[in-house]
Image (tube, helix red, strand yellow):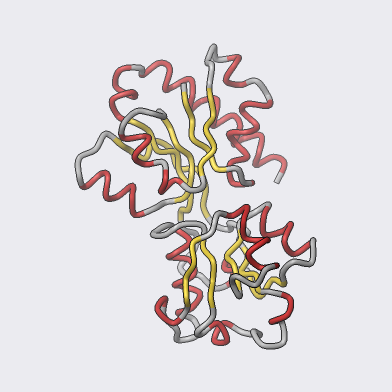
């Protein structure tokens, strides 16, 4: 079975299920396909190219449901705190000291119309700013460090482990943790999205897959 997954700390449960052999123990041969965000994978799930995709909530999921496509949120994956970081270029440290200083600045997000859009909007809201007050650029998470280094953007909304690696490598300075600003909390951020035709036709296999993923999440919580 195919599982689309984002290469980030948020996908720990999936990687642990693979590493610990939970899929193998369940008699499953699971093939993973790396994606940038779940928004990019919804069409893949709807056409059964992959049976399950893991990632953050995105408008594409709700659009798929409203259009009657065979997609469903099968299992909630995570909620706040999410340990994201709003990171600015080191050379702008003395110029961008607060949220209001982001006005007119370029900020990179991983993809449009995702949970990150909500997150940055709520952060800006605390300083009386709107989404339209910043210049948004969409850059894959693993390309955010180079974008800061070559000054393509002023700031990025990084996710673990990429955000931490940027800060530890001196390529960026963390301005704030969105978890300290977004309200109300907790709010759901990640989920497993599945093809409903596959769920109907292969219920036992689907059950084994999600039990293995849940086992991975249980191990992950124990190590956080």
Residue depicted at x 79% and y 61%: 168
Task: Give coordinates of residue 132: x percent, y percent.
Answer: 40, 78
Identify whether 99 is placed above or below 70: below
Task: Give coordinates of residue 151: x percent, y percent.
Answer: 65, 72
Identify whether 212 is placed above or below 29: below
Identify whether 211 is placed above or below 188: above
Q: Is residue 15 left or right of residue 68?
A: right
Residue 69 location, quadrant = top left
Q: Is residue 39 left or right of residue 93?
A: left
Residue depicted at x 52% and y 15%: 28
Q: Residue furthest left?
A: 67
Task: Give coordinates of residue 19: x percent, y percent.
Answer: 68, 26
Give the number of callouts. 0
Residue 70 location, quadrant = top left
> Which sits in the foreground, 172 or 204?
172
Residue depicted at x 59% and y 29%: 215
Residue depicted at x 65% and y 42%: 221
Residue 117 location, quadrant = bottom left
> Which sits in the foreground, 43 or 196?
43
Identify whether 36 is placed above or below 5: below
> Which sits in the foreground, 155 or 201?
155
Q: Is residue 66 left or right of residue 192?
A: left
Q: Residue furthest right?
A: 169
């Amino acid at each position: 079975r195919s599982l689309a997954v984002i290469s980030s700390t948020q996908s720990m449960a999936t990687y642990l299920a693979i590493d610990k052999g939970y899929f193998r123990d369940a008699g499953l041969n699971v093939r993973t396909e790396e994606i940038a965000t779940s928004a990019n994978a919804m069409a893949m799930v709807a056409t059964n190219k992959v049976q399950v995709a893991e990632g953050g909530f995105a408008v594409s999921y709700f659009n798929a449901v409203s259009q009657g496509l065979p997609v469903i949120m099968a299992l909630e994956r995570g909620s706040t705190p999410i340990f994201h970081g709003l990171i600015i270029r080191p050379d702008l440290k003395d110029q961008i000291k607060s949220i209001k200083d982001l006005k007119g600045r370029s900020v990179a997000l991983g993809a449009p119309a995702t949970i990150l859009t909500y997150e940055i909007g709520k952060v800006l809201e605390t300083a009386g700013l709107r989404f339209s007050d910043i210049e948004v650029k969409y850059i894959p998470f693993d390309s955010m460090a180079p974008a800061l280094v070559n000054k393509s953007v002023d700031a990025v909304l990084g996710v673990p482990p990429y955000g931490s690696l940027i800060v530890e490598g001196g390529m960026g300075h963390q301005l704030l943790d969105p978890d300290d600003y977004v309200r109300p909390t907790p709010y759901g951020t990640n989920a497993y999205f599945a093809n409903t035709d596959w769920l109907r036709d292969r219920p036992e296999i689907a059950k084994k897959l999600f039990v293995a993923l849940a086992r991975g999440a249980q191990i992950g919580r124990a190590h956080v």
